[in-house]
Image (spheres, coloured by chain):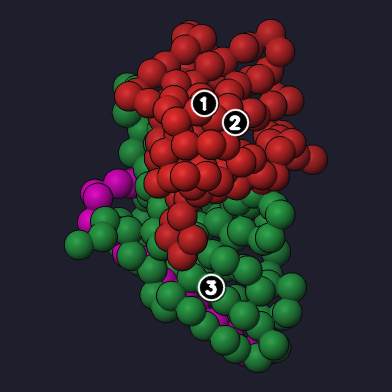
Chain colours: A green, B red
Amino acid sequence: DADVTQTPRNRITKTGKRIMLECSQTKGHDRMYWYRQDPGLGLQLIYYSFDVKDINKGEISDGYSVSRQAQAKFSLSLESAIPNQTALYFCATSDLTRKGNTQYFGPGTRLTVL
Amino acid sequence: DQQVKQNSPSLSVQEGRISILNCDYTNSMFDYFLWYKKYPAEGPTFLISISSIKDKNEDGRFTVFLNKSAKHLSLHIVPSQPGDSAVYFCAASRITGNQFYFGTGTSLTVIP
């Protein structure tokens, strides 16, 4: 079984609709992240969380919100989707160790906003 | 402003030869660097990392070199295999930091 899972894997929606992307992990990591990837661009950080009570904005948080319902779950919401939010979205987890901070990614959600 | 840059969008190499992927960064506070590999329809997977106290780290066929004065790192794959064909991202952070900064990726094709 995958350590980091994302649902749905693909989603097509219309402008103005509310969308939620979900992420679950079984790695027991405290840190969770949401990224988006656009063609020709690297991964851009949307939000991150270090525990259930902790939410932090990343580079491109406008138009997004998140919820950390439990250590293992981190949801990303688009309150009113717009076409330029069409992208590949990745959830990641990490656990700071003596050797550093390595992230483990889910398989991604491909979102299309028409 | 892009703090981590991969200036080569693509690279083609013959099977058995060396692949060299390059990455530059601008923030001198970064002290931890990682390479990720990504296949289509999958998330990035961790490949190898290096902290700034080292200038080289090896793991099997993969070696990462860090040149702190030039703010440059490279990933060497020797020998290259067709299964290495993927997009490679470099990333940088503070070793105790909150955020990772990713490059735009280099698509490697290993030709059999």
Q: What element carries label 3?
A: strand
Residue drawn 52% across and 83% down? A11
Disc 2 with disc 3 on a shared chain: no
How much space separates mark 2 and mark 1, taking CA atoms? 10 Å
Residue A47 in view of the camera: yes
- What residue type is disc 1 on? Ile
What amino acid type should be assigned to the residue bearing mark 2? Leu
User: Which dot, 2 or 1, sits closer to the camera?
Assistant: 1
- Image check: A30 left or right of A60? left
Disc 3 marks a residue whose amino acid type is Arg
Q: Which mark is residue A83?
A: none
* Furthest residue toward right: B1
Q: Mark 1 lies on which chain?
A: B
Image-based side of A41 in relation to B98, left or right = right
Residue, disc 2: B21
Start-end of magenta stretch: A16-30
Q: Name the residue under label 1.
A: B18
Mark 1 secondary-structure assignment: loop
Q: Residues within 10 Å of mark 3 (few under 14, many from 20)?
A: some
Q: Are marks 2 and 1 on the same chain?
A: yes
> For mark 3, what is the residue?
A110
Secondary element under disc 2, as helix, strand or loop, is strand
Q: Are there few (<14), some (14-19), or many (20+) residues within 10 Å of tag 1?
A: some
Residue positioned 30% across, 46% down in the render: A29
For marks 2 and 3, give the CA distance. 27 Å
Q: Residue B26: which quarter of the image?
A: top right
Q: Is residue B72 above or below residue A114?
A: above
Measuring from the top left, give residue A56's x and y in whole percent.
55, 51
Q: For residue B61, which quarter of the picture?
A: top left
Subunit bearing disc 2: B
Q: Residue A32: x, y in percent? A: 41, 52
